[in-house]
Image: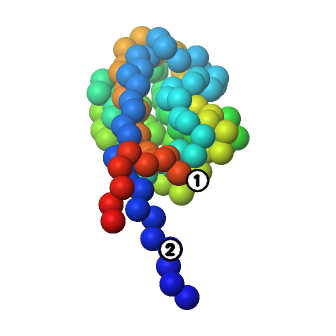
C-alpha cells in the first residue's frame, strides 16, 4: 500500500490573550481564545507575569465548553510567576468552540495579577501553499 502524500502546507497560527485578576470571576468559565472548526492545538502555555495576590490560592484551568481542563493536566498556580506548558491532547476542535479559562480562588479575591495564555495551532484541511 502506498501512502497518499498531502502537499498542502500552512504555518502554525499563534493566538494569545492577556488577563488581569479583575477580568475573571471565581468559578466561572470565560471565553479566552476563539478557535476555528478543525483546529488542533500543537503548543501553548500559561505565563504568570505578575503573581496573583489572593489570600490563600488562585489556580487557572484551560479547556473548552466540553472539557474545562482539556489543556491543563493540573490547574496552573497563579500565585507564582512562572511559565506552564499546556497539556497537548491531539483533540480536533470540530465545531469552532473557544478556549476557555476558569479561575478558582480560595480566600479574598486577588486585586493584582496578570497572566497570558497562548496557543499555536493548525487547521485540518487548510493549505496556504503546496509542497511537491
Q: Can residue 73 be seen in this view?
A: no
On the picture, is 85 further left or further right than 23? Answer: left
Marks 1, 2: nearer the viewer? 2
Q: First in sequence: mark 1 or mark 2? A: 2
Q: Position of residue 87 (x, y in %)?
A: 47, 52
Could you tell me which residue is drawn at 43 percent across and 49 percent down? 127
The numbered disc on residue 4 is 2
Mark 1 residue element:
loop
The numbered disc on residue 91 is 1
- Residue projecting furthest to the bottom: 1
How far apart marks 1 and 2 lie (CA) works out to: 23 Å
Quarter placement of the N terminus: bottom right
Quarter-wise, where is residue 76 in the image? top left
The numbered disc on residue 22 is none
Q: Where is residue 114 in the image (x, y as percent from the top left)?
A: 35, 21
Could you tell me which residue is drawn at 46 percent across and 21 percent down? 55
Mark 2 residue element:
loop
Front residue of this view, candidates 73 and 86: 86
Quarter placement of the C terminus: bottom left
Vertical relation: 22 (above or below) 8: above
Could you tell me which residue is drawn at 45 percent across and 64 percent down? 6
Could you tell me which residue is drawn at 67 percent across and 39 percent down? 95
Front residue of this view, candidates 74 and 93: 93
Q: Is residue 49 visible?
A: yes
On the picture, is 75 further left or further right than 117? Answer: right
Front residue of this view, candidates 81 and 14: 14
Q: Position of residue 73 (x, y in %)?
A: 53, 51
Vertical relation: 77 (above or below) 23: below
Quarter-wise, where is residue 94 in the image? top right
Q: Position of residue 77 (x, y in %)?
A: 43, 37
Front residue of this view, candidates 64 and 120: 120
Amino acid at each position: 500500500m502506498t501512502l497518499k502524500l498531502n502537499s498542502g502546507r500552512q504555518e502554525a497560527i499563534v493566538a494569545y490573550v492577556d488577563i488581569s485578576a479583575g477580568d475573571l470571576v471565581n468559578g466561572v468559565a470565560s471565553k479566552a481564545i476563539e478557535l476555528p472548526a478543525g483546529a488542533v492545538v500543537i503548543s501553548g502555555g500559561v505565563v504568570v507575569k505578575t503573581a496573583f495576590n489572593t489570600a490563600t490560592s488562585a489556580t487557572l484551568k484551560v479547556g473548552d465548553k466540553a472539557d474545562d481542563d482539556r489543556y491543563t493536566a493540573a490547574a496552573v498556580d497563579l500565585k507564582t510567576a512562572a511559565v506552564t506548558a499546556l497539556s497537548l491532547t491531539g483533540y480536533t476542535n470540530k465545531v469552532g468552540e473557544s478556549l476557555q479559562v476558569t479561575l478558582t480562588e480560595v480566600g479574598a479575591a486577588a486585586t493584582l495579577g496578570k497572566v497570558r495564555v497562548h496557543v499555536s495551532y493548525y487547521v485540518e484541511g487548510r493549505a496556504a501553499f503546496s509542497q511537491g
